[in-house]
Image (cartoon, rainbow, N blue to C red):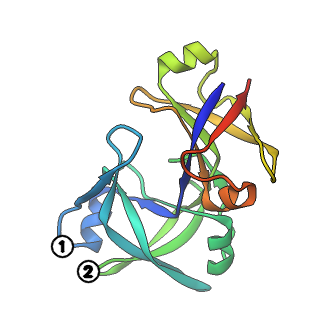
Amino acid sequence: MKVKVEVSNRHVHLTEEVYHQLFTKPLTKRNNLSQVGDFASNESVTIKTEGGSIENVRIVGPFRSYNQVEIACSDARHLKINPPVRKSGDVVGSSAITLIGEKESIVLENACILAERHIHMNPSEATRWNVVNNQTVQVKVEGEKSCLLDAKIKISENGTLAFHIDIDDANATLLKTGDEVEVLI
């Protein structure tokens, strides 16, 4: 089975409460993302640790029930932190990080992760592929930097079929958004 690649850069998901602590203006949509209902906003924050900072980190909407900062391993090295590899929303015991918005800055004690590689799909696609949520599959990357990568299946009602990897994984394998890879089940 083939699936399209989508490369994810660093970004944050916020609760409405935390967003309003950081900004006076409403969250505004810049563009829709492939997963139904998700969008890149016009607003961004600076993320900061004692080791460093990164400016212009995009906020992805809509608001969530949790606060999460997703970065790549190279970002973690720059910030001098060691966040765990986790699925989205699993932030308990993750790294602390400071967010700086237009209004103020706040420290999020459990928020920063390296996102695990995953394949989004809806329930009918999962049935067709004969996979279950959180199942680990292998993704075959062909080309000059061919390899096998593990990825988790992520099933949601509004899921749109896509293989999500961070920018470091994309650079290491020479993949870019729109490329296709084969999923081995």
Residue type, label 1? Thr
Q: Position of residue 84 (x, y in %)?
A: 67, 58
Residue at 24% x, 67% y: name it: 20
Q: Are marks 2 and 1 in contact (CB under 8 Å)?
A: yes
Q: Position of residue 13 (x, y in %)?
A: 41, 57
Quadrant where the N terminus is found in the figure: top right
Count of marks placed on residues: 2
Quadrant where the C terminus is found in the figure: top right
Residue beneath disc 2: 103
Residue type, label 2? Lys
Find numbered disc 1 in the image and state the secondary structure of the residue it sits on.
loop
Residue beneath disc 1: 24
Q: CA distance from mark 2 to mark 1?
A: 7 Å
Q: Which mark is residue 62?
A: none
Residue at 52% x, 64% y: name it: 10
**Looking at the image, is 81 positioned above or below residue 90?**
below
Q: Is residue 143 left or right of residue 156?
A: right
